[in-house]
Every structure is written in C-alpha cells, then in structure tokens.
Image (cartoon, grey):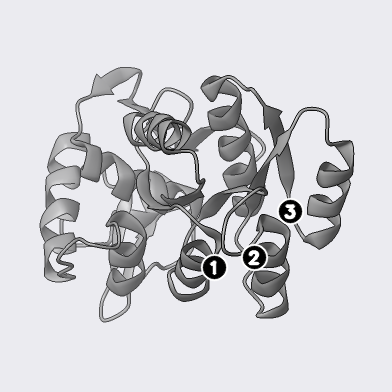
Amino acid sequence: MRVLVVEDDPDLLRLLAGALKDAGYVVDTAKDGVEGHHLGDTEPYDAVILDLGLPEMDGITVLEKWRKAGRTMPVLILTARDRWSDKVSGLDAGADDYVAKPFYTEEVLARIRTLLRRKAGLASSDIECGPLRIDTRAARVTVDGNPVRLTSLEYRLLAYLGHHKGRVVSRTELVEHLYDQDFDRDSNTIEVFVGRLRKKLGVSVIQTMRGLGYKLAEDAGEAESDGAH
C-alpha cells in the first residue's frame, strides 16, 4: 500500500515516514503544498497524510483541488490541537479523518489502517482467505496459524491483493502501488514475487487471470484450477 505524507516540519515528516515504512507501507513525501498537490494529482496513492499549515499552498486548498479534480484517495489531515475550526474546514473540504498535534504515531497508523479498511469494505484488520490470514495491524501473515516469513515487498504485494480480495489487479496497478516515486519500476518483477509468495504460502490463494493480472481468491479452493503455483 502506498501513502503520501505532506508535512513541512522535517523532523515530523521523517518520523511519520519512518513509522509508515516500518509498518510495511511504501511512502512518498512532500515538504510543501505545491509539491504535495502535484504528487497527489499525478500518482495513485492508497492514502494521504496532509498537514494543513503548509508553505506555498495550504492544506485546505490542496485538498479542495484534489477533490475538484476527482481524486478520491482517503485523506487524513493533521491539525493543531487548539484549532477546531481547521478540523471542520478540513472535513468540509473532503478529508476523511483528522489527528490533532501533538499525536502518537500509533494513533496515526491506526487511523490509516481504518481508512484503508473502510475503502476496501473490510470490517476487520484481519484479512482471511481460506487458511491464509493477513494481520494488517502487525504486518504478519499466517497459514493455518503458522507464521510465514515474507520480505517487505512480498508482504506489500499480498496485503494489496488482500485489500482488493476478489478483484483482478493488473500488474501495472501493483507496480504503481508497491513502489515509491523514484523506484525503477518493472512490471515483470511482479511475476517473480508472486511466484515466491506461492511457494512460501504453500496454499493456492493467488489466482492468475491470464492477460489481466492477479486475484486473491475469495475462497482458497477457487484458485485450485490455476496451474501456476
């Protein structure tokens, strides 16, 4: 899952980006409203953390421009604790949630998980498919209760499919959501990582839709007819 953080305080930006990366997210950052608006307008993010007090272009304006342009990604705004009017303005401009400064990074992570879960129509932080269980709170994967060790990219790929369970996800979409802005993207590597995942999971849950992409089957048995394991 790919997240954009727009924050002009370098220490806070570094803190948030580090916490998100440790939690398994791909993170892009921007230090002012103009750069943040450009990234959010041109890159496909799963969620955005947006400070309202930004230089060059304030957060409310950034958010309003995104929404007017039809950008629908969930947005979590950061506000000053004593500025209740900012919270109202942010929500009215199209924000999905807010966190007041100072805050605990655990709360920000929990709210991002909630926004992603809501966007995916999931009721729980746990994504299950047959014997497979993805715990998005701990970034942990188990099969029949046994832990499966995955690399960060393998986990991100599986988690993205999990958040879109039952839907075919193209290689291009996976590349756009698994790598940051500066990564040298190659959709052919997705097939390699899918192959590694299948071996590590040991169960048939990832279905290949020839010429279209991949799908995490609603039921583990649904992928049995897929010859690639």
Q: Amino acid at mark 1?
A: His
Instruction: Give how far across and how far down residue 200 sits, in percent.
Output: 16, 36
Looking at the image, which is closer to me, 168 or 39? 39
Residue at image position (62%, 64%) is: 57
Which residue is outermost to the front? 56
Viewed as shown, does residue 74 lie left or right of 40? right
Residue shown at 58%/19% (left/top)?
104
List x then y, in percent, for residue 31: 45, 52
> Which class describes the residues within 10 Å of circle 1: few (<14), some (14-19), or many (20+)?
many
In the shown orientation, is residue 175 left or right of residue 93? left
Residue 110 quadrant = top right
For residue 173, above or below residue 113: below
Where residue 61 sits, quadrant-wise, is bottom right
Q: Which residue is mark 2?
A: 62
For disc 3, the marked residue is 95
Q: Amino acid at mark 2?
A: Val
User: How far is the residue under mark 2 from the one under mark 3?
Assistant: 11 Å
Instruction: Single out the mark in the foreground, 2 or 3.
Output: 2
Mark 1 touches mark 2? (CB < 8 Å): yes
Task: Estimate how packed mark 2 is, as few (under 14), some (14 to 19) or many (20 or more) residues with alpha carbons within 10 Å.
Answer: many
Q: Nearer the viewer, residue 170 or 62?
A: 62
Q: Position of residue 119 (x, y in %)?
A: 63, 53
Quick one: label 2 or label 3, which is nearer the N terminus? Answer: 2
Residue 37 is labelled as: 1
Label 1 vs 3, first from the N-terminus: 1
- Secondary structure under tag 3 reads loop
**In this view, 204 is above or below 82:** below
